[in-house]
């Protein structure tokens, strides 16, 4: 089956101050997600599944579906707090979503038995990245192991001057396969490069800006959906009781679990494109300048749709 693009767009962007997924970044009204859809379309993707909150569907239809017309098939999936494995319940006063792994789980019916790529709605990944991942998904299948992929980016190119970011920090072997991935939820830019904290800023550990990180641009076979069932049961059994209001199930953590269990391999695909995104409101002018430069260079037409 032809690969599907899955777009995580359910987060409200608390650090940004609103729905950054539908905030225009140029004079033509294009959003970052428009560029991802445009790149995905020319790479070969024909269907995109948006994971959103149900109450935002009308906004996304107006700002995305109506805008691109018939250029791609668009479907919506809803990340809801009560969409959890049977036998568990939502803790009282919980309002925070369950994390990126749960977001992909919410798209299970829309994905079906197709291979699929996963991206964030508010990140720019680049033309080459979409082509490489589409080609991988079109030519690889599971055999004795699950055969997954991700597009890796240099950490130093993914940091902001305006606060901390979360990144999946990766290690690879000589053949370019992922061997380890650790989710660092608070990484900052420093005078020497970068550093992360695990104690709310009391101490910081240096990390090389040349490190490869995941920006949640993954490629999965349908087997990953099945694995998410077991992952969420484990998450609600072991993690939620100790942190009922804030515990999250992250995609990198579940990929790492499969790696450690020798059940999967992950090809780390590199791209010469530069990632950029809008974590904070103050990031927007930088993104606008980069988008303008790409259009001026002819990478994108003035009007995408």
Image: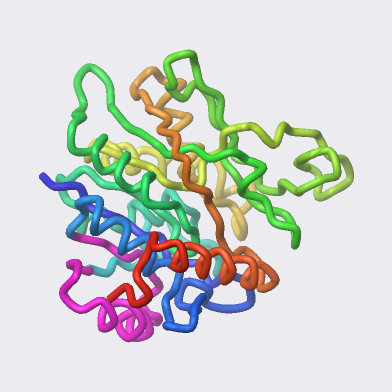
Residue furthest left in the image = 1
**In the visual, does 62 lie left or right of 293?**
left
At a point 34% along the width and 77% down the height, the residue shown is 303
Give the image location of residue 233, x and y in percent. 40, 43
Camera sees residue 15: no
Which range of residues does the magenta coloring cover?
Answer: 47-74
Quadrant of the rendering where the C terminus is positioned: bottom left
Query: Which of these two is toward me, 65 or 270?
Result: 270
Magenta-colored stretch includes residue 270: no
Give the image location of residue 105, x and y in percent. 34, 52
At a point 87% along the width and 40% down the height, the residue shown is 203
At a point 45% along the width and 62% down the height, the residue shown is 297
Residue furthest front in the image = 297
Give the image location of residue 109, x and y in percent. 20, 57
Camera sees residue 101: yes
Residue furthest right in the image = 202
Magenta-colored stretch includes residue 52: yes
Give the image location of residue 213, x and y in percent. 56, 38
Query: Which of these two is toward me, 77 or 288?
Result: 288
In the rendered view, tell whether residue 60 sits above or below residue 158: below
């Amino acid at each position: 089956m032809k690969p599907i693009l899955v777009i995580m767009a359910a987060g409200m962007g608390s650090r940004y101050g609103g729905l950054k997924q539908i905030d225009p970044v140029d004079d033509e009204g294009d959003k970052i997600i428009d560029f991802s859809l445009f790149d995905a379309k020319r790479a070969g993707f024909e269907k995109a599944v948006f994971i959103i909150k149900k109450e935002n569907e009308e906004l996304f239809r107006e700002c995305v579906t109506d805008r691109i017309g018939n250029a791609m098939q668009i479907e919506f999936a809803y990340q809801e707090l009560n969409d959890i494995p049977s036998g568990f319940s939502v803790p009282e006063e919980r309002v925070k979503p369950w994390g990126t792994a749960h977001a992909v789980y919410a798209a299970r019916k829309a994905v079906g038995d197709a291979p699929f790529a996963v991206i964030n709605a508010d990140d720019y990944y680049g033309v080459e990245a979409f082509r490489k991942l589409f080609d991988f998904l079109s030519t690889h299948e599971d055999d004795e192991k699950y055969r997954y992929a991700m597009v890796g980016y240099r950490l130093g190119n993914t940091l902001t001057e305006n606060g901390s970011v979360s990144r999946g920090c990766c290690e690879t072997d000589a053949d370019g396969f992922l061997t380890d991935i650790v989710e660092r939820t608070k990484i900052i830019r420093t005078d020497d490069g970068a550093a992360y904290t695990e104690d709310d800023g009391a101490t910081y550990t240096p990390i090389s800006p040349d490190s490869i990180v995941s920006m949640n641009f993954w490629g999965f076979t349908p087997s990953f959906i099945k694995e998410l069932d077991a992952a969420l049961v484990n998450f609600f059994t072991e993690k939620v009781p100790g942190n009922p209001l804030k515990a999250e199930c992250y995609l990198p953590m579940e990929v790492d679990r499969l790696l450690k269990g020798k059940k999967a391999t992950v090809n780390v695909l590199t791209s010469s494109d530069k990632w950029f995104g809008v974590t904070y409101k103050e990031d927007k002018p930088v993104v606008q300048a980069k988008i303008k430069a790409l259009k001026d260079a002819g990478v994108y037409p003035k009007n995408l749709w």
